[in-house]
Image (tube, helix red, strand yellow):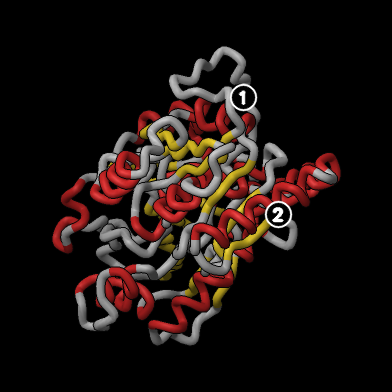
Amino acid sequence: MSKTVFLETHNLKNKATGLGTFNYELIKGLYQLDFNDLELTLNAKEPKILEAEFGDKFKYHKYTNLSRHHIFRVRKKYDLWHSVNQNTKVEPFHVNKYLLTVHDVNFAEEISSDMNHKVNALFRAKLEKSTAITYISEFAKKQTHDYFQVPNVPEYVIHNGNPISTLLDTSSFISNIPIDKPFLYSIGDFLERKNFLSLVKMMVHIPDLNLIISGNNNKSYGKEIERFINENHLQNRVFLTGKVNEVAKQFYLSKCLAFVFPSIREGFGLPPIEAMSFGKPIFLSDKTSLPEIGGKHSYYWNNFDPEYMKTTLLDGLNDFYSNQKEKENLMKERAASFDWKVAATEYLKVYRKCLI
């Protein structure tokens, strides 16, 4: 008889975020594999949409907001419950075996380091009932151990895959932003930890290039960046696109001179891998997980002084484009090393180990 596994994957809708991408790509990776010994149930707001794509490979459970509250939790007892990220409030009513996947514990730095704060208490409760823990990077594992008492259970690091599995035809895409001048590109949620403002400040010193940033800039941090752009007369060189679809994202990634991502807190960092798929030079901060993801052929900023960032960028561009073909191939090889099917295979191995 097959063992039952419940995947708490309800956060599927927003694939513009790391968690939404993770849930969907993990499901896609699992779909490509054989697991006749397991019955996997997906938690989803709209199970019919998933069923239309993945058929009877999985069982499906309809998520409701009420299931976040203890009395309305899922009553069915599964052999293994996979909490696919550390933030979800959806928990099992009956705890049998419990696998926790940790993406980051940034909340311990950004919200409160008080271990009695509700966000930390929620996470501690997840840790304490875990049969095993997976992390999406070595950094996420280290960060968790730095802030929390981690129980003595098996721990595994499983890197995410590359979200770009297919290069799209972008030839019919028309940009409403001028791209006649060489441009740098970045993408992400407009949160202070993404550190986009450092890029805009750098652009004051680089008049020969433009900068395009995609993501939901209708937030306080986005407004702060817009004010800086206006006050420094950068409106014709720095452009905020807002959210973009997959075609637009791949268009800008394919046309940019370089991908720039100075984030100061990342549990993993998917956008740099996407940019690597196009063989682009990658410029990252040297903070948190990014050196682990970027590898030895990316370029790194160790501080965010605008003049220093400019020098590092121009030196890196000169290095990359002086040996462009070889460098492009190295970046594409790096991108290919992050594979969702490989990641899904590792998660299946962990499921089976938990169920022994």
Residue 147, horizontal then vertical, whole percent: 39, 82
**What kind of element bears circle 2?**
helix
Gap between marks 2 and 1 measured at Cα: 31 Å
Q: Could you classify mark 2 by the number of other residues whose Cα lies within 10 Å: few (under 14), some (14-19), or many (20 or more)?
A: few
| Circle on res. 224 | none
Residue 21, horizontal then vertical, whole percent: 47, 44
Is 167 left, or right, of 130 in this rendering? right
Give the amino acid type for the residue marked by disc 2 in the picture.
Asp
Q: Is residue 35 above or below residue 182?
A: below
Q: Please give the name of the residue rendered at 82% of the width and 45% of the height, measured from the top-left corner.
A: 322
The reply to whether the C-beta atoms of the residues labelled 2 and 1 are less than 8 Å apart is: no
In this view, the residue in front, 37 or 196, is: 196
Q: Residue under circle 2? A: 315
**What kind of element bears circle 1?**
loop
Is 261 left, or right, of 265 in this rendering? right
Q: Residue under circle 1? A: 168
Q: Quadrant of the image for the C terminus?
A: bottom right
Residue 245, horizontal then vertical, whole percent: 45, 28
Quarter of the view holding residue 76: bottom left
Residue 229 seen anywhere in this rendered image of the structure: yes
Q: Please give the name of the residue rendered at 43% of the width and 30% of the height, measured from the top-left corner.
A: 236
- Number of residue marks: 2
Q: Residue furthest top?
A: 172
Disc nearer the start of the sequence (2/1): 1
Q: Please give the name of the residue rendered at 48% of the width and 36% of the height, measured from the top-left corner.
A: 212
Q: Is residue 128 above or below residue 327?
A: below
Give the amino acid type for the residue marked by disc 1 in the picture.
Leu
Is 305 left, or right, of 126 in this rendering? right
